[in-house]
């Protein structure tokens, strides 16, 4: 009974957060979050071919158009964007699943790269930061570039400075030190034994962690069932559905959303009809 009441309370809190973020006011400029994501392999969604280095914008009205970025032209074929954060000004920080060289930048899979106005630059040299060559940052949320403040996860257990981080752990790097923020077992319980956390957004103020996994997980006393294409949120000890990909029409065989970011956008439309007329990150 206590557990059920707590779960209901958490659900109400999350609903309140979503409603507040949406700011629904008919016919006026409103504010909400959109999801920018990337899949782990080339696929077709809604008749649109999407490469593993392409980005997809998921709208509140169920639309999910391809977001055109220079990444598909800049990155070589066979390189998968497996971590990303959208920053203000259209800047994008990302990591890849393999090493690549492009536009004058050489990056490994443990690095973070900035795409700004079509130019690439290295913002986190994983090796210089103490990550071993075997490490692959496959989930990242960049809070700040200067000073550097990054939450990340890796695709396989690694040892950094004498500490071992698992593939479902969330680690924070402040430019000097790698610190365990949340262990996979505390997030997922027994499911942590087989699941890799491969996409991440952190709300450090409210202590919420929104993430995706590389496998489907089953429901349990403190978690909901979710597929690899879904996003879930850890809040107050519960893992709840944040974004159900199949319910939003994102269906593709073996779909795995292995990178995503939340973007705050301003809209001028009638949300009740779902008629999105225009959007911008700065003005309606």
Image (cartoon, rainbow, N blue to C red):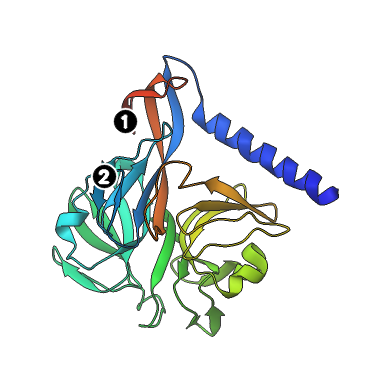
The quarter of the displayed image where residue 175 is located:
bottom left
Q: How many numbered discs, if any?
A: 2
Label 2 or label 1, whichever comes before in sequence order: 2
The extreme top residue here reads: 27
Q: Which residue is tagged 2?
A: 47
**How many C-alpha atoms fall within 10 Å of the one at disc 2: few (<14), some, or many (≥20)?**
few
Q: Is residue 110 above or below residue 133?
A: above
Q: Residue furthest right?
A: 1
Q: Nearer the viewer, mark 2 or mark 1?
A: 2
Q: Position of residue 68 (x, y in %)?
A: 22, 45
- Relative side of 169 to 47, left or right: right
Q: Which residue is mark 1?
A: 280
Please tell me how crowded label 1 is: few (under 14), some (14-19), or many (20+) other residues with Cα within 10 Å: few
Horizontal placement of 73 versus 209: left or right? Answer: left
Let me know if residue 277 appears in the view.
Answer: yes
Residue at 51 percent across and 25 percent down: it is 23
Identify the element where label 2 is drawn. loop
Q: State the residue at coordinates (46%, 47%).
A: 246
Residue 261 place in picture, x, y as percent: 41, 49
For the C terminus, the quadrant is top left
Residue at 43% over, 33% down: 60
170 is higher (above) or lower (below) than 165: above
Kindly indicate whether the residue at mark 1 contacts the one at mark 2 (C-beta within 8 angstroms): no
Q: Secondary structure at mark 1?
A: strand
């Amino acid at each position: 009974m206590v557990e059920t009441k707590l779960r209901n309370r958490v659900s109400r809190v999350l609903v309140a957060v979503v409603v507040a973020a949406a700011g629904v006011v008919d016919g006026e400029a409103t504010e909400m979050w959109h999801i920018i994501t990337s899949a782990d392999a080339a696929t077709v969604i809604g008749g649109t071919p999407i490469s593993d280095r392409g980005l997809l914008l998921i709208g509140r009205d169920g639309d999910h158009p391809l977001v055109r970025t220079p990444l598909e032209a800049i990155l070589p074929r066979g390189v998968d964007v497996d971590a990303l954060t959208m920053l203000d000004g259209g800047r994008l920080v990302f990591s890849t699943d393999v090493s690549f060289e492009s536009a004058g930048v050489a990056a490994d899979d443990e690095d973070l790269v900035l795409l700004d106005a079509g130019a690439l630059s290295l913002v986190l040299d994983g090796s210089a930061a103490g990550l071993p060559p075997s490490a692959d940052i496959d989930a990242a949320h960049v809070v700040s570039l200067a000073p550097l403040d990054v939450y990340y996860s890796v695709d396989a257990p690694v040892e950094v400075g004498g500490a071992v981080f698992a593939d479902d752990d969330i680690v924070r790097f402040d430019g000097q030190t790698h610190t365990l923020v949340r262990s996979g077992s505390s997030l997922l319980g027994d499911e942590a034994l087989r699941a890799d956390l491969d996409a991440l957004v952190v709300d450090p103020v409210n202590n919420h962690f929104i993430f995706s996994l590389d496998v489907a997980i089953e429901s349990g006393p403190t978690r909901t069932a979710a597929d690899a294409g879904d996003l879930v949120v850890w809040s107050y000890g519960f893992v709840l559905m944040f974004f159900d990909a199949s319910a939003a029409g994102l269906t593709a065989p073996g779909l795995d959303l292995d990178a995503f970011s939340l973007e705050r956008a301003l809209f001028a439309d009638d949300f009740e009809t779902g008629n999105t007329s225009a959007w911008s990150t700065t003005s309606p």
